[in-house]
């Protein structure tokens, strides 16, 4: 299985195609803030929501998906409040 990491600091399309997500790491902007993101199965926040991930105050939250989270139509990340950065691990089978 091959993988790559995508770093986001603003809302955006992570993948326009179906994709496997191995992990998400979410960090708040500073030690006194909480952060949240939502992932959608598609290319916008009007597509079906897959999940929302939140952190505690000043805490980095790492979510590992075993074996992986599968999107069917693409992947969109909606950055909520006080997010410093998001790292999303994308996975695929080698050809």
Image (cartoon, rainbow, N blue to C red):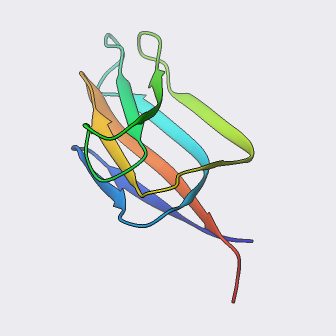
Q: Position of residue 80 (x, y in %)?
A: 26, 26
- The foreground one among 73 and 27 is 73
- The foreground one among 37 and 57 is 37
Q: Position of residue 84 (x, y in %)?
A: 30, 34
Q: Position of residue 48 (x, y in %)?
A: 39, 36
Count of numbered marks? 0
x 36%, y 51%: residue: 42
- The foreground one among 55 and 42 is 42
Q: Quadrant of residue 10?
A: top left
Q: Position of residue 63 (x, y in %)?
A: 62, 34
Considering the image in quadrants, where does the N terminus appear? bottom right
x 41%, y 38%: residue: 39
Residue sitting farthest toward the bottom: 95
x 55%, y 55%: residue: 89
x 32%, y 49%: residue: 8
Relative height, residue 23 to residue 15 (above, below): above
Considering the image in quadrants, where does the C terminus appear? bottom right
Q: In the rendered view, does 35 fall on the left or right side of 91?
A: left
Q: In the rendered view, does 10 fall on the left or right side of 55?
A: left
- The foreground one among 15 and 82 is 15
């Amino acid at each position: 299985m091959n993988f790559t990491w995508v770093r986001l600091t603003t809302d955006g399309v992570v993948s326009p195609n179906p994709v496997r997500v191995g992990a998400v790491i979410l960090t708040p902007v500073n030690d006194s803030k909480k952060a949240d993101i939502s992932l959608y199965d598609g290319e916008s926040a009007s597509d079906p929501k897959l999940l929302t991930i939140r952190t505690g105050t000043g805490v980095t939250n790492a979510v590992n998906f075993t074996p992986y989270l599968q999107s069917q139509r693409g992947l969109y990340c909606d950055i909520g409040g006080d997010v410093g950065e998001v790292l999303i691990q994308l996975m695929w089978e080698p050809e």
